[in-house]
């Protein structure tokens, strides 16, 4: 088989066979195909697209390009959740202990974040001593013991995606439905889950600019999951403003803990409950959404979800003391308030602008090698639909880089649009597919 011919075939808009896609992915992983040829094929795919069959082939070959986690030793249906990413998205920290407290085993493989803030593993590193990389044996043993483990992805989990994503990033071929879907689903499928709940974000702080685009991505990933014999459901949720009020790492952990204590912001609670309902339904524990939601609320109200979170942190070697004393979490030396220039009602809050500001403060990374400042971030005092008076706080910025404070504050201010009339806040959950 010849890579030049495969590139020409897709360049001319033809359909690639499974053997051709397999040849490509194998060559990417073993290094026999040079980056310039991989980049050429990625651009051909970007321009001429892939059909549903090609996309599923690509996903399967990427999934099989490295390790696959075997969770069969864990009793019951294992349900995983994936978010397409957003600003202030700390749902995993709330959702996993909440679902585990309902009796469903949660074996969550996740990674470090690129962009606005750290990923789930970065956030968990706010707890001193926590082990964020468990080998497969320890991972399975912990889930069997306490029903919950969250670990960083294996270095050899879907290596094809690691290489291709780096090339897509530098060749402007990221924004392609088939390449996005294969990247997400290959990792979820290789992680060993029996069923998958997808949280597909829509809005300026997420990947999809509108509901139509989010729905198209969701349906593509659902189809891939089903063709690979995995039950798959998608929840489309709004990301036109940050989720919750905290954007950062340790401050997001604090907000997640407050949510588990029953004091969470409405949008974070609502989304966590909807995702939780879908996970309980896919687990086979419930066939009735009302009963599933009722149990989730009970586990929050009774403190069972918080107790599970403590048990999980302790099981992975983390110091649980900060759960009751937030002063023990990493914090920033410097802070600055962003104040409202006039009175009125918040009618828009640009999540992307907030996210970029958070990254500049040190809470996120542009490259995987960049360090993360766990104490940096932004706390939002005013969000869409809330009233503000001139001079009142819109947000508080936290950082250990004093020189960036005023620069970020100037960047942040246009994120809030203040009007004279109150606007109705839309539900964070758009639809379930």
Image (cartoon, rainbow, N blue to C red):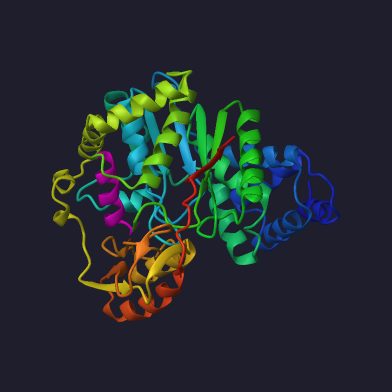
Question: In the image, is residue 253 part of the stretch drawn in magenta?
Answer: yes
x and y percent of residue 127 in the render? 22, 49
Residue 389, compared with residue 109, is above or below; it is below
The residue range painted magenta reads: 247-260
Residue at screen point 75% across, 47% down:
50
* Whether residue 44 can be seen here: yes
Residue 394, compared with residue 138, is above or below; it is below
x and y percent of residue 262 in the render? 26, 39
Closest to the observer: 18 or 276? 276
x and y percent of residue 278 in the render? 48, 30
**In the image: residue 47, left or right of residue 115:** right
Residue 420, compared with residue 430, is above or below; it is below
Give the farthest residue toward the front.
421
Q: Quadrant of residue 73?
A: top left
Closest to the observer: 221 or 17? 221
* Whether residue 137 can be seen here: no
x and y percent of residue 267 in the render? 40, 46
Residue at screen point 56% across, 49% down:
161
């Amino acid at each position: 088989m010849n890579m030049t011919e495969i590139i020409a075939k897709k360049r001319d808009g033809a359909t690639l066979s499974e053997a051709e896609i397999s040849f490509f992915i194998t060559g990417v992983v073993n290094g026999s195909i040079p980056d310039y040829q991989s980049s050429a094929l990625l651009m051909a795919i970007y321009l001429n697209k892939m059909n549903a069959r090609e996309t599923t082939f690509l996903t399967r070959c990427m999934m099989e390009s490295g390790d696959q986690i075997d969770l069969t030793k864990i009793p019951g249906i294992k349900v995983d959740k994936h978010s397409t990413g957003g600003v202030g998205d700390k749902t995993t920290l709330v959702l996993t202990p909440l679902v585990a407290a309902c009796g469903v085993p949660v074996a969550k493989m996740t990674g470090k974040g690129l962009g606005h803030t750290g990923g789930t593993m970065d956030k968990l590193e706010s707890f001193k001593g926590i082990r964020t990389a468990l080998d497969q044996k320890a991972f399975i043993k912990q889930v069997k013991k306490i029903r919950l483990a969250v670990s960083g992805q294996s270095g050899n989990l879907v290596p094809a995606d690691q290489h291709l994503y780096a090339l897509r990033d530098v060749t402007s071929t990221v924004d392609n439905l088939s390449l996005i879907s294969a990247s997400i689903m290959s990792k979820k499928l290789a992680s060993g889950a029996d069923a998958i709940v997808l949280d597909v974000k829509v809005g300026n702080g997420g990947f999809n600019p509108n509901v139509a685009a989010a729905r198209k991505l969701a349906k593509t990933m659902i189809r891939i999951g089903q063709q690979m014999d995995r039950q798959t459901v998608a929840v489309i949720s709004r990301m036109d403003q940050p989720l919750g009020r905290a954007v950062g790492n340790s401050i997001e952990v604090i907000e997640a803990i407050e949510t588990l204590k029953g004091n969470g912001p409405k949008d974070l609670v609502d989304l966590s409950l909807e995702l939780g309902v879908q996970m309980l339904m896919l687990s086979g524990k419930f066939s009735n959404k009302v009963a599933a939601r009722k149990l989730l609320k009970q586990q929050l109200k009774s403190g069972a979800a918080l107790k599970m979170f403590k048990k999980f942190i302790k099981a992975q070697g983390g110091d649980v003391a900060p759960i009751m004393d937030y002063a023990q979490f990493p914090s920033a030396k410097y802070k600055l308030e962003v104040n409202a220039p006039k009175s009125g009602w918040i009618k828009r809050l640009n999540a992307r602008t907030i996210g970029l500001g958070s990254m500049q403060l040190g809470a996120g990374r542009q490259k995987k090698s960049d360090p993360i400042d766990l104490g940096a971030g932004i706390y939002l005092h005013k969000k869409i639909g809330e009233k503000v008076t001139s001079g009142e706080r819109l947000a508080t910025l936290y950082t250990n880089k004093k020189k960036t404070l005023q620069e970020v504050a100037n960047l942040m201010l246009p994120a809030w649009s203040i009007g004279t009339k109150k606007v109705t806040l839309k539900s964070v959950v758009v639809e379930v597919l």
